[in-house]
Image (spheres, rainbow, N blue to C red):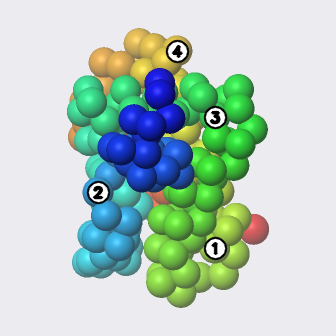
Amino acid sequence: MDAALVAYFFGSKRELFDEVVNPFSDSSALIARLLDGDPRLVGERLARLVIEALDDTGRRERILGTIRTAAVEADTARKVGEKFTTELLEPVVSQLGVAQAPLRAALVMSQILGLALARHVVGLDDLTSASQDELVAALAPTLQRYLVGDIS
């Protein structure tokens, strides 16, 4: 791709990267959506948001493309970690008032990445055939524990 096109359409490589790795809209709106409601259900809200994003073809392809690139490019991996863990998940955990926000955010991210890879890259039959509700029910308790529960 011509660098002039990147500058014309996105302003900079960083803005292009942000557009590609951000399958969700505004981070502040997403954080508010996750925190809106009973804190005992934040894991379920996050699980549903992730499953819905992965089931949307356009978003899924962007997410998987980013994961694949991060697997082979250290700079991309670092940027993905910053984008999702530091800018999105850590603020959620911090606002929930629990300690160890960076560790909790990383644990949540590990579950999301694992599910994305197992369901959409490896194609494990039981995950690909499961409904959104089944996946949310299975994933939510783990995310909830990582977000606000005991991780010691």
Q: Return the residue at label 3.
A: 70
Q: Return the residue at label 2.
A: 25
Point out the image quarter for the C terminus: bottom right
Is 108 situated left or right of 4 in this image? right
The residue tagged with tag 3: helix, strand or loop? helix
Looking at the rendered image, the disc whose residue lies closer to the viewer, 1 or 3, is 3
Q: Return the residue at label 4.
A: 122
Q: Is residue 48 above or below residue 100?
A: above
Q: CA distance from mark 1 to mark 2?
A: 22 Å
Q: Looking at the picture, which amino acid does disc 2 mark?
A: Ser
Q: CA distance from mark 1 to mark 4?
A: 30 Å
Q: Is residue 125 above or below residue 108?
A: above
Q: Residue sitting at 31 percent across and 25 percent down?
A: 130
Looking at the rendered image, the disc whose residue lies closer to the viewer, 1 or 2, is 2
Is 44 situated left or right of 1 in this image? left
The residue tagged with tag 1: helix, strand or loop? helix
Report the front residue among 136 and 122: 122
The mark that comes first in sequence, 1 or 3, is: 3
Q: CA distance from mark 2 to mark 4?
A: 27 Å
Image position, residue 151 (x, y; %): 68, 66
